[in-house]
Image (cartoon, coloured by chain):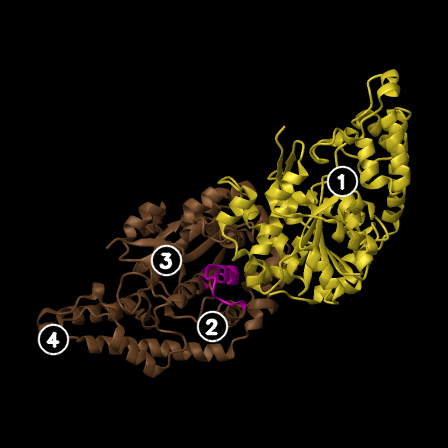
Chain colours: A brown, B yellow
Amino acid sequence: MNSKVTPWEVQGEVDYDKLIQEFGTKKIDKTLKEKLLNKMKEGPNMISRDFFFSHRDLDIVLKDHTEGKGFFLYTGRGPSGQMHLGHVIPLLFTKYLQDAFDVNLYIQITDDEKFLYNRERTWNEIKKNSEDNIRNIAALGFNPNKTFIFRDSEYIKNIYPLILKTARKITFSTAKAVFGFTNETSIGMINYPASQIVPTFFEKKRCLIPSAIDQDPYWRIQRDIAETLGYYKTAAIHSKFFPPLTGVSGKMSSSIKESAVWLTDDEKTVKKKINKYAFSGGKETVEEHRKKGGEVSVDVSFQWLDIFFEPDDKRLKEIKEEYTSGSMLTGELKEILIGKVNTFLEKHREAVEKVDVEAYLYKGKLAKEMWDKNYE
Amino acid sequence: MNSKVTPWEVQGEVDYDKLIQEFGTKKIDKTLKEKLLNKMKEGPNMISRDFFFSHRDLDIVLKDHTEGKGFFLYTGRGPSGQMHLGHVIPLLFTKYLQDAFDVNLYIQITDDEKFLYNRERTWNEIKKNSEDNIRNIAALGFNPNKTFIFRDSEYIKNIYPLILKTARKITFSTAKAVFGFTNETSIGMINYPASQIVPTFFEKKRCLIPSAIDQDPYWRIQRDIAETLGYYKTAAIHSKFFPPLTGVSGKMSSSIKESAVWLTDDEKTVKKKINKYAFSGGKETVEEHRKKGGEVSVDVSFQWLDIFFEPDDKRLKEIKEEYTSGSMLTGELKEILIGKVNTFLEKHREAVEKVDVEAYLYKGKLAKEMWDKNYE
């Protein structure tokens, strides 16, 4: 099956090595891996197990860090609906990076993009989603004095001239080539890339963007124009896609409800969903499974453990061996994942209840500084 | 010579009747003229002498007024540099309309457009121009409690969602067809029309836009989408172009310095400019002129008197007769205009010194109301 990867669509089984070539990025090599693993206390597995696998200028960012020049992190979230695990995992990786390097982090809520993208959506819907999403993101535990979460529609007053400056540098033919715009694309959508590029200019340091690789086209344009505007080319660190329950190809999608585990799913729902929908690499009958064993490369439950939910390498190896040999059945593998997911969600919902959202939006040290700045 | 009329370019001798057909607007007929003349205390000549000659839905606006539904006025200024007489005259007409109908008026300072349009311009340049232009516009004497002058870059915080809503309705193919955008146009410029359309939605009444006819394309798009967004199709009243000193074709241009009289030109400069550059319909020698007379239709000095500087119909007729018969020489005709222009500029500069700009921007009744509003 052919695959298709754009910032708005991921289809089919993705060949990540091919994507590195197509996009012109670099694989995270052994040296870079070691440098990251030396620093990261949480989530090193996301590097060592190649979930984050590709980058642009990560080497320069780490050099800047070593030399004391510093860098900053930038990521975002499109508030198209409620959030699922596929949204949270790259954000958590970003938090781990922030903790490891003690740097500022900007989280853009692209309410403008999500409103423009879908001509049926109302602004009230977007506002509600934004509020919900911001609360869930803030609950992930970013440093409240070094993290600024902002809605595009609200922060535009501080950055509009810089958006214009950016938009003036990008021709329609460039935008069309990179994003595949057509004659039917709205003029707002055509201009949107400028909004997503501007936060890479928030500091006169190098910016590092953790995101799934489908967002890379934005950074390609940024890198073409940044220096002519007096800023640095942004760096990026790219993840693979967090697979939907329904199979390891494509990415977890908000529009196919059963493909995702939502942050609001209760224990029973999680159990039911994983048991019913999680694509299994096991065999059709217990007998056959015991004899031939399961296949972890296509088993979504195993993939989720591998990507995030089983950080212990030794334990993961055991699970792999037991499942592959057939001594562990699909139901048992799923049981392990269900437990992990429910523990995670319970802890998350407690954090959501307690989190001080205002710190990230307005009152923390970085947020306060940002509301006092005007970018021209 | 062929003519070309777009919002950014006016070239050649314009056939206004043809333009009405091309643009699909209507001529201001006798009935409408009378209705306007009945109301207007100042500047009725700009109607009676056909400087404002074309419209869209002006009849409905006047009906709405009679029926007590009301309407509002909207016009704008692109702060590309200092202002000349060609910029001021449509604004004065707008003031006369405001006085005649006692309605709210919104004046948009399109700093975003002017920055996007010219890739060499700095934002500081635009800011300086905006400040200068706003002061000059405010000095024209609009009702300070019913007039809101706003910079796009500053008011965007109150209207961004409505800009998105508007931009979402306009496809690239529409914008391309109307404005002639190409692959080299910047994505910012492509999105700009949304900013210029939004003020037509400031009130749930019909909007009337006085402007030179080259701005009409914006209103065509507005009229296509307004009702689907729950607003009225805007009405418009169109003027011809205020001719440059150098000849009655084209329009007074900021880029050709000698073609314009600037609001900052002192008495001597005005005298020198008009004497040197004002294209004359007079004959080459005094003898020939005395014998054959001058031609007012190509004489810029006469045209300026006709459009604005000689409101007295009787006196204008005398001048026309004397000049056409040859009893008035070009130098004498120019002397009359020089006197009128200098009186106007002197009075204007006094007003500029005294004007309370803040009332129009922030402190007047309408301005205050507008800063409290958020358009979604």
Q: Position of residue A24 (x, y in %)?
A: 36, 45
- SS under mark 4: loop
Q: How many marks?
A: 4
Which numbered disc, 4 or 1, marks the residue closer to the eye? 1
Amino acid type shown at disc 4: Thr
- From which residue to which does the magenta span run? A98-123
Q: Mark 3 — on which chain does it sit?
A: A
Q: Is residue B365 left or right of residue A66?
A: right
Badges 4 and 1, same chain: no
Residue position for label 1: B86
Cα distance, mark 4 to mark 1? 86 Å
Cα distance, mark 3 to mark 4? 36 Å
Q: Is residue B8 left or right of residue B242?
A: left
Q: Mark 2 — on which chain does it sit?
A: A
Q: Mark 1 — on which chain does it sit?
A: B
Task: Judge by depth and name the residue closer to the eye, B373 or A75.
Answer: B373
Amino acid type shown at disc 1: Gly
Amino acid type shown at disc 3: Glu
Amino acid type shown at disc 2: Asn
Discs 2, 4 touching: Cβ within 8 Å:
no
Query: Does the rendering let one see residue A166?
Result: no
